[in-house]
Image (cartoon, rainbow, N blue to C red):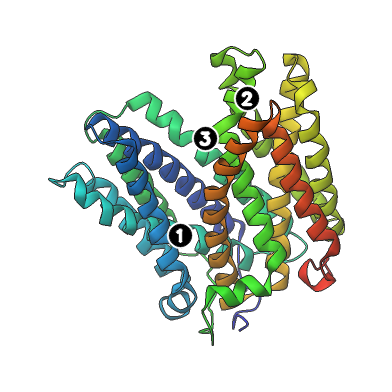
Amino acid sequence: MQSSAGSIPGSTLWSRAAVIGAAMIFGLTYSLSAALIALDLAERGSSDTFIGVNAAMHAVGVLAMAFVLPRFAARAGMRCMVIGALAVAAVVLVLFPAVPSIWLWFPLRIVLGAASETLFVMSETWLNSLSTDATRARAMAAYTAALSVGFALGPFTLSLVGTQGGTAYWIGAGFSILALMCLAMPGIAQPVFDEPVDANPLRFIMLAPIAMAATVLHATVESAGLSFLALYAVKLGWLETEATQLMSCMMVGAIMLQLPIGWLGDKLDRRRMIIVLAGLAVIGALVWPWALLSPWTTYPLLFVWGGVFVGIYTIMLTIVGSRFSGSQLVGIYAAMGLMWGAGALIGPVFAGVAMQWLTHGLPMFVAFVCACFMCAAICSPARDIRAPA
């Protein structure tokens, strides 16, 4: 179904800035809570299995919400959905240190996952609806960069305040309330959607298979890199303290290079950009074994590679926004949330197997999955990766 608002009249720079700011705060609270809950449970004597199962409850919440988001967005309205999700996230974060039993953290984690999925999908859809095709790539680049900044600030905030007591939980809740207040201010433009005929995520996966593949690729490589990049560098002779900085270098590149990539995405054929960026990601990953022999080559390569790789997702978000609108767009992004979870699950598993069998298993694995995506993008029908009009 198409949005009954089409293009939003009177949408302003302030509206986009508010949504992008909310996305950054979402990234911050998500990364803060994920690390905080795991560390808190460990300090309470919970086993690794218990912590892992509890973390999996987040995915249960994501899965449950993905099936109902398109209909909820049409009935409740986007602003109401986002503000409600931020309020729920704030309350749940405060409840974690307050409830008497850690077994109650399981349903809390499910609710937090549902709120996170709502914020993630609604913010992407909202920003796309506020953008024209001429500026959509830059808007989504700003969104992706802000989200990356938020992901980076979460662990940094936790390193400052620690895990003792409920301070970190209250800080996360405070950031959620701050985002809520920004989006509740008057003058924020929002789209109005018709209710979809079919809200089944499987239907939306079939509507945009390459977008789903790009999401799986992004989550697979990101989760594999977070798990094994430092370990890979240590095996090549890096000191542990220096090896842990490599992911930060890659993330800085992902943040800083999104705006120029977005600018190019508004000027060039986006289908070709996706293929070129994927090709550059393949070449860059294959160069890792030689580049990591020296810091002088490692840091520039990872900086550029991080920006190029995340740029694939940025341009794909732009293409999806230009192809779909209204409730269909909500459904596509909800399905992409499911694919993100799948990629985050398989990434560390297969990367670990590759690392066990090959010295340079991590870059070989990354190059392989990037090459698979590039081939899929090349072979896909034009309707699956439509260039801008």
Labels 3 and 1: the sequence-earlier one: 1
Left or right relative to 41: residue 227: right
Image coordinates for residue 333, horizontal then vertical, percent:
57, 65
Going by the image, does 70 lie left or right of 380?
left
Rendered residue at 85%/55% (across/down): 267
> Can residue 181 be seen?
no
**Residue 274: image x %, image y %?**
80, 54
Q: How far from the left and from the top, in percent, is residue 106? A: 27, 52
Q: Which residue is mark 2?
A: 232
**Which residue is situated farthest in the bottom direction here?**
197
Q: Residue at x 48, y 34 (%)?
A: 153
Q: Residues within 10 Å of mark 3 (few under 14, many from 20)?
A: many
Marks 1, 2: nearer the viewer: 2
**Which quadrant would the N terminus be assigned to in this image?**
bottom right
Q: Residue furthest left?
A: 100
Residue 231 picture quarter: top right
Residue type indicated by callout 1:
Glu
Would you say the residues marked 3 and 2 are in contact, meaning their CB atoms lie under 8 Å apart? no
Read off the residue under disc 1: 117
Q: Secondary structure at mark 2?
A: helix
Q: Nearer the viewer, residue 119 or 246?
A: 246
Residue at the front extreme of this rendering = 357
- Residue at image location 63% in from the left, 31% down from the top: 355
Residue 160 sits in quarter: top left
Label 1 sits on a secondary structure element that is helix
Residues under labels 1 and 2: Cα distance? 32 Å
Between 184 and 96, the one lying in front of the other is 96
Q: Which dot, 3 or 2, sits closer to the camera?
A: 2
What type is the residue that disc 3 sits on?
Ala
x, y percent for residue 362: 67, 33
Callout 3 secondary element:
helix
Identify the residue under disc 3: 152
